[in-house]
Every structure is written in C-alpha cells, then in structure tokens.
Amino acid sequence: YLMPSALDPVSREVIKKVRFVPCLSLDSDKCIPMIDEYIKMGACGFELTFSKETDEILAAIRNVRDNHLFFAATTLLDKWCGGRGDDRAVENDEEEECWGTLYKQGANIFMTDRPEQMIAFFRKKGVLFK
C-alpha cells in the first residue's frame, strides 16, 4: 500500500479535483493510520476489507462513519468482510448475522453477488435504498 503522504505532487492535485474512494485492507497494520490521511485529502468514502473483527478494526470503521463518509463492504467472500459474506448469509440463513451486522457497523454500500437476496433482506428490515 502506498502511504498517502508518499503521493507525488501531480497525484495530490488530481485527488483534490475528483471524488476518490480508497480501498484498504484493515488486516494490514499500515492501513488503519491511512484512513485519517485520506480523510484529510478529501476521500468521499472507503472500501474496507478485513478478515476478522477486532476492536481496532471496528474503531477504524466508526472513524469513517463518524466523519460522515460511506463504508463500502465487500461481501463477496468471507475473508473480505470479517466472515460475514454472501454465501454464509444465504446458505446458512444468517442474513441478520452477516449483512445486518455489517449494516449496524456502518456499511452503507454493499458489493455483493447475491443482490436479489440482499435487497429482499433489507426491504424486509425496512431499510430504504437511495
């Protein structure tokens, strides 16, 4: 991962003019501190992946949401969303434990390969998609 402070001046100027969404693996010790740097640079949200939920990772997610930025959760594979992936949600009838928990943690964008099931789940919960 490239530290935001290591970006060349041209890249820094481009980032000021576009909406950008860093994708960070919170499993890397280097990535959690990057969140604040990217927020200062104007990130509009983050795709955050993580293989397990730790206090530090959950705090990093709260930091993103406390700054009124979106948190995109990638639920395609368990290893990208703390074990709360699409297959587990659908095949084990654990939508609440998977998608519901990620939503409660602050995820407001989901990258899924089970859109019909996920939409049905969130409609049943009364969550509106805009």
Image (cartoon, rainbow, N blue to C red):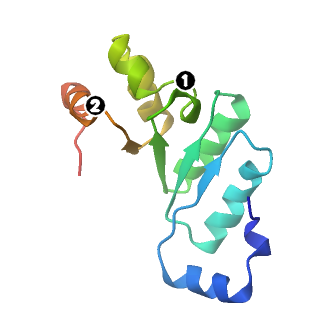
Q: Which sits earlier in the primary sequence, circle 1 or circle 2?
A: 1
Please tell me whether residue 108 is drawn above or below residue 102 in the rendered image.
below
Q: Is residue 9 left or right of residue 23?
A: right
Which residue sits at x=63%, y=51%? Answer: 24
Q: Is residue 126 left or right of residue 15?
A: left
State the image coordinates of residue 86 (x, y, percent, origin top left).
39, 27
Which residue sits at x=78%, y=72%? Answer: 5
Q: Quadrant of residue 28?
A: top right
State the image coordinates of residue 26 (x, y, percent, origin top left).
68, 43
Which residue sits at x=58%, y=30%? Answer: 79
Residue annotated with mark 1: 83
Q: Which amino acid lies under the numbered mark 2 shown in the image of this protein?
A: Met
State the image coordinates of residue 121 (x, y, percent, origin top left).
25, 26
Q: Residues within 10 Å of mark 1 (few under 14, many from 20)?
A: some
Q: Which amino acid lies under the numbered mark 1 shown in the image of this protein?
A: Gly
Q: Is residue 24 left or right of residue 90?
A: right
